[in-house]
Each structure stands twice: as structure tokens, then as C-alpha cells.
Amino acid sequence: MKKISICYSEHATKVSNSYCSGSSKKGFISSILTLHSIQTAVTCIYRVKASNQREFFVRLRWLDRLNNKGFAFGICDHPLSLDRISKNSRILRKSRGTEAFKSCDFAIEIYWDFSHAKFEYGPEPINRFYLVIILDSEVGLILGDMEQEILGIKERVFPTKIGESALVSRSESFSGDAVYSTRAKFCETGTWHDVLIKCFGDDGVTLRKNPVLYVYMDKKMVIEVKRLRWNFRGNQTIFLDGLLVHLMWDVHDWIFRPWLGCGVFMFRTRSELDSRLWLEEKSFEQNGFSLLISVCKNPD
């Protein structure tokens, strides 16, 4: 994210008062667009603290290649290094199974079952699945809703120890035009929010004439950026669940290099004590959460 982060000044930050007040002068504007873009990949990074207080990071990347769903697993110890995670990663394509291996000085066991999982719009399962990761005989991460199966795996671990885990980063990749929707929880004690991003011009389809960027939270418009040909990069701030949440966008290629058609949107929680908006990889060393949405108009 270094390329995008150097484009902005602290003085460009604005607070969206419309959402702070809980109401919006403009309601949820319906677009003539009826088709949403396609979610192609989801990457989540979790911070896990073991019972001995050792910290490490687990990256899960949910994949969908022609409906051949699977996930990639990677790990590194503290501090976070994306390069080290990539070197210590592997792809698992079976719908269910177990895997035991050594990586990054950890003895790792992974148990998963997606054979009856329900998927919505992308490669990430939403229910009827489980994924349990055990590191050095300690349960490090539990995902899914199949409680009996998860309990059976936990009982096999002796002594049963469960580390603390928290989602610190989520990245979603899309292909398609103009409308991008997802759900996010910006802090552990917060609630789930529907996030919708729309970006199009006067014709409601392309960015050729007077493009405008709209961002909605729970069907309320929180950000509107007009004259997008001038404001193709920028950032604004909203107040959500008692937190400052910054949105940064870069749609330069959408407008000026349409054959590439790439755009980037990033949400990140920020403490009032933070001295910088974007700390790139260092942001994972702080308490907080980031959501990155990258979009490409061409599926390839």
C-alpha cells in the first residue's frame, strides 16, 4: 500500500457529519445498475496470541478458480511480514480433510470441512462449515458454525488450550463494473455493517462523463465525491461504533487508463493518538482493523 499512501496529506481528511448524526439528507439512492460485481478472492489476516503470550499472524486466502473453491494458508510469527507469510504458505483444494506439517517453527494441524458449506456471492463460505487450526498442540483459530464437529476436534487436543485471535485485516478482490458490496465489523465489540460502493457517471454505467463516487453504510450515504476526474485520489473520515474510520480511494486507472480498470478502496480504524493516517504494514502492529477492496473491470 505504499504507492497509495503517499498520495495524500493529513490536511485532506474530512469527517462525514451526516453519518455521525445517524441520519442522512439523501436516502439510499437506487442505481439503474442491477448487476453487482463478482467477488473473486478474500484474504483475512488474524493476530493470534498463544497461552504463553507468543504472538503470530495467520493469513487465510479464500480462492475461487472456475468454482474450484479452496483456501491458501500462511503463517509468520511476530512481527508481521507478508513476505514470510508467502514463503510459509500452501494451497488446500479438497472440500474436507486434515493436514499436518511444519512451518515457521510451528507444528501445524488444520482440520476443515466445506463439503456442505453455503456460499453467497464469493469464494468464502458463510455457514455449514468449519476450519480449525492447531499450532503446537494449542487451538489457535476456529472458524465456522459446525459446533459439534469443532468440539470433537478441541477434545482431541490435550491439554486443551485455546489462544486469543482477532481479525486485523480483510482484503476483497472483485471484477466487474461500478457496484461493490460487502459486510464488515470494524471492531470486536461492534456490529456488522453493510458496505456499498458505487462509482459511475451521468449515464449510470460508465465513468466517461461527470463520474461520482458514493459510499453507503447500512443504506445511508456517508460519502459523496463529485468531480472524480479531479478527486480520483483522496480520503475522508466517518464516525462508526465509537471509532474514527478512514476511507481512502484511488480510482485513477478507472478514469484515465480504462484498459487496466483497477481501483482501490481502503477502510481503516484509527485511534485519536495515531499520528499518521496509513502506516502500511506497521498498521498490523497497532490495535485496529483494515478493510481493503480492490476491483478490476476486466475479469482477467
Image (cartoon, rainbow, N blue to C red):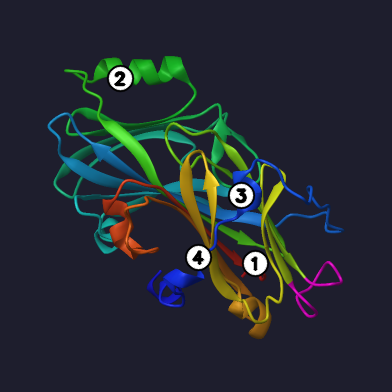
Precedes in sequence: disc 2 or disc 3: 3
The quadrant of the image that shows the N terminus is: bottom left
Residue 92 appears in the figure: no
Of residues 185 and 274, which is closer to you in this image?
274
Q: CA distance from mark 2 to mark 1?
A: 40 Å
Instruction: Choose between 143 and 26: the one closer to the eye.
Output: 26
Q: Residue at x 18, y 28 (%)?
A: 137
- Which of 61 and 203 lies nearest the eye of the viewer? 203
Q: Callout 1: helix, strand or loop?
A: loop
Query: Looking at the rendered structure, which numbered label has been put on residue 63?
Result: none
Residue under numbered circle 1: 299
Q: Which of the two marks, 3 or 1, is nearer to us in this view?
A: 1
Cα separation between marks 4 and 3: 40 Å
Q: Decide: marks 4, 2 in contact (CB < 8 A)? A: no
Q: Earlier in the sequence, mark 2 or mark 1?
A: 2
Q: Is disc 1 surrounded by few (<14), some (14 to 19) or many (20+) residues within 10 Å?
A: few
Q: Nearer the viewer, residue 82 or 238?
A: 238
Magenta-colored span: 201-211
The numbered disc on residue 13 is: 4
**Spatial CA span between label 4 and label 2:** 46 Å
Which residue is tagged 2? 154
Total numbered labels placed on residues in the image: 4
Say left or right for 137 vs 282: left
Q: Are marks 3 and 1 in contact (CB under 8 Å)?
A: no
In this picture, residue 182 sits left or right of residue 48: right
Q: Do we see residue 111 in this rendering?
A: yes
Residue named by callout 3: 67
